[in-house]
Image (tube, rainbow, N blue to C red):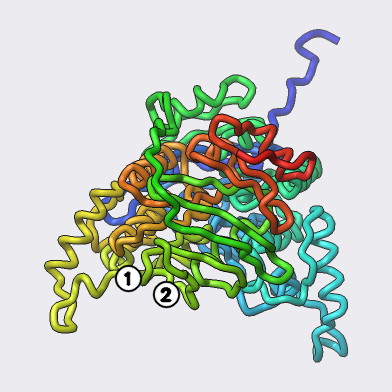
């Protein structure tokens, strides 16, 4: 057979081919002529700072947002996606960073929404079969949600994320989009997620993976597409670039020092917690927090770290003793805590920290209307002055204070929450996953804000599942496991290995 007789290799038809995608919101160009080509059975990461256009691109693919220009082909066929239903019919499923679950329905109902089994020709729902199918879907991923009959609203954030992922994977989609899927997962849950994603890849599913955790991007993806300011920077093989190079593509500059230097001037304890307990959740938690100090709290999912912070904030009932400024402190509600100068930034900012449909002005004002009122009426002039000052303080990037918070990037939304509590005059800040779902550039800004607040004498309790964040920002570090504090480390003593060993129960932590 001559060379001419040898058939040419058949080029693989891309599973997803998006060309020239553009989208404008009023005066803001969210996407500008973006191309994205992904092959069948590929795990492809999309990276970029908040505001780069990642979410808009995903929403166009999901049928939630109409593109202004460009074309989309799926398996070589030009496809219109005018609605989420159309996208679902095309085999596209999206797990958004902000959950799309129905809170009052059970875990099983959410996973099987629209597919609930029935008996007697559809007259009754077969609850037993529904529970079995939902449990099987979670088990196939290695996820543990103890009771699938519980309402989703009663679950911790990490388990809600598991339900969201199981729901999307149940249909074995042609294209699965995961938007920050690991933001509330860690340890074994993250490993199980990666195993499930790889199994889908091996079965031919195309996976688009969006994450600000760059170590995950390199672990799970074969190629990476980078967006910046709504435009395409480029697509690279993960094996051909390192994290520093990827950061340069994302932000257009070097981030030589993401964590600001700490030169803490720590006073006497402001907040003291003794034997704080909540039945079957955490027990005998003791900690001190001083002005000017950042105390980190690390632990794997289920360790009780968020539950402790909620109890200190008065969101959940607890027993034990607390003092604030030398006086007894027993908040019956978050309102009580706020009146004493204690504020909490929740890990779920969309649910607990913001009213997304309201403006930046209104969200920043929510806890401080008394400062803006004259004779019971809000002074718009005073409100605008206070809000504008706080926006500058925390560097919220927005066209105006009247812009809707839902239009902001994740990093700017988080800064609005921080600004809300600072405007209230909080002296103790309980920060639960303060950089969840924000990009590396926004993280650096939030870290700068936290360090500046500590320098001004604020007492800060920082809860995080990201070890580099805990190590880079904390003056002292507490490690939780099974609802107890099992280790305390000074800044100089702490290493990733020691913190993980204590959190996993390999060894007990040593006292600082």
Residue at x 85%, y 63% (from the top left corner)? 136
Is 324 situated left or right of 491 in this image? left
Secondary structure beneath dot 2 equals helix
Can you tell which quarter of the image residue 118 is in? bottom right
Residue 32 shows in the view: no
Q: How many marks?
A: 2
| Above/below status of 224 relative to 98 | above
- In-front residue for pair 107/67: 107
Question: Residue 64 location in percent, x, y?
Answer: 50, 61
- The image shows residue 182, relative to residue 216, as above or below, that is below
Q: Residue 31: give x, y in percent of width and height.
A: 39, 45
Q: Residues within 10 Å of mark 1 (few under 14, many from 20)?
A: some
Evaluate if marks 1 and 2 touch, with contact meaning CB atoms under 8 Å apart: no
Q: Nearer the viewer, mark 1 or mark 2?
A: 2
Residue in front for this viewpoint, 333 or 99: 333
**Outermost residue, top direction?**
2
Mark 2 Cα-neighbour bin, 10 Å: few <14, some 14–19, many ≥20: some
Q: Quadrant of residue 378?
A: bottom left
Image location (x, y in percent) of residue 294: 46, 45
The structure residue drawn at horizontal position 55% and vertical position 26%, both measured from the top left corner, is 243
Quadrant in which the C terminus appears: top right
Q: Which mark is residue 366?
A: 1
**Seen in the image, is 113 located left or right of residue 373?**
right
Q: Is 382 displayed left or right of 359 in the figure?
A: left
Residue underneath mark 2: 336
Quarter the N terminus occupies: top right
Which residue lies at the image location 77% right of the left edge and 39% below the top edge? 507
Would you place residue 377 above or below residue 414 in this image?
Answer: below
51 with respect to 302 (left or right): left
């Amino acid at each position: 057979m001559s060379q001419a007789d040898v058939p040419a290799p058949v080029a693989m038809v891309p599973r997803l081919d998006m060309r020239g995608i553009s989208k404008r919101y009023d005066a803001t160009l969210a996407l500008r002529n973006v191309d994205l080509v992904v092959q069948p059975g590929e795990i492809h990461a999309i990276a970029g700072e908040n505001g780069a256009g990642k979410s808009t691109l995903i929403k166009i693919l999901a049928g939630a947002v109409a593109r202004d220009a460009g074309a989309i082909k799926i398996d070589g066929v030009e496809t219109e996606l005018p609605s989420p239903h159309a996208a679902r019919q095309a085999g596209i499923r999206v797990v958004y960073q902000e959950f799309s679950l129905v809170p009052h329905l059970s875990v099983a109902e959410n996973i099987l929404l629209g597919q609930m089994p029935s008996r007697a020709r559809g007259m009754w729902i077969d609850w037993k079969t529904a529970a079995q199918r939902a449990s099987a879907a979670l088990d196939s991923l290695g996820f543990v949600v103890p009771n699938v009959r519980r309402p989703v609203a009663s679950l911790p954030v990490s388990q809600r994320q598991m339900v969201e992922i199981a729901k999307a994977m149940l249909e074995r989609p042609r294209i699965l989009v995961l938007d920050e899927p690991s933001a509330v997962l860690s340890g074994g849950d993250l490993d199980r997620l990666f195993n499930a994603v790889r199994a889908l890849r091996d079965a031919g599913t195309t996976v688009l993976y969006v994450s600000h955790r760059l170590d995950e991007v390199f672990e799970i993806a074969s190629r990476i597409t980078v967006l910046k300011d709504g435009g395409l920077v480029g697509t690279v093989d993960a094996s051909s670039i390192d994290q520093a190079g990827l950061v340069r593509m994302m932000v257009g500059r070097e981030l030589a020092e993401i964590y600001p230097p700490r030169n803490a001037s720590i006073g006497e304890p402001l907040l003291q917690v003794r034997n704080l307990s909540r039945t079957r959740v955490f027990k005998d938690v003791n900690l001190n927090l001083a002005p000017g100090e950042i105390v980190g709290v690390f632990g794997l999912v289920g360790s009780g770290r968020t539950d402790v912070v909620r109890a200190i904030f008065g969101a959940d009932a607890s027993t034990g003793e607390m003092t604030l400024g030398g006086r007894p402190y027993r908040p019956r509600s978050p309102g009580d805590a706020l009146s004493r100068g204690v504020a909490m930034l929740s890990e779920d900012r969309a649910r607990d920290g913001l009213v997304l449909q309201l403006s930046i002005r209104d969200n920043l004002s929510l806890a401080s209307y008394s400062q803006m009122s004259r004779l019971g009426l809000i002074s718009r002039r005073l409100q605008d002055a206070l809000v504008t000052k706080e926006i500058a303080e925390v560097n919220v990037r927005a066209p105006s204070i009247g812009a809707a918070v839902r239009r902001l990037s994740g990093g700017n939304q988080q800064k609005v929450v921080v600004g809300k509590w600072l405007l209230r005059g909080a002296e103790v800040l309980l920060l639960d996953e303060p950089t969840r779902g924000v990009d590396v550039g926004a993280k650096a800004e939030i870290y700068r804000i936290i360090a500046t607040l500590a320098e001004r004498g604020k007492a800060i309790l920082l809860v995080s599942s990201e070890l580099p964040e805990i190590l880079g920002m904390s003056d002292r570090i507490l490690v939780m496991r099974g609802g107890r504090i099992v280790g305390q480390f000074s800044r100089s003593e702490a290493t990733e290995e020691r913190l993980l060993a204590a959190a996993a129960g390999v060894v007990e932590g040593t006292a600082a």
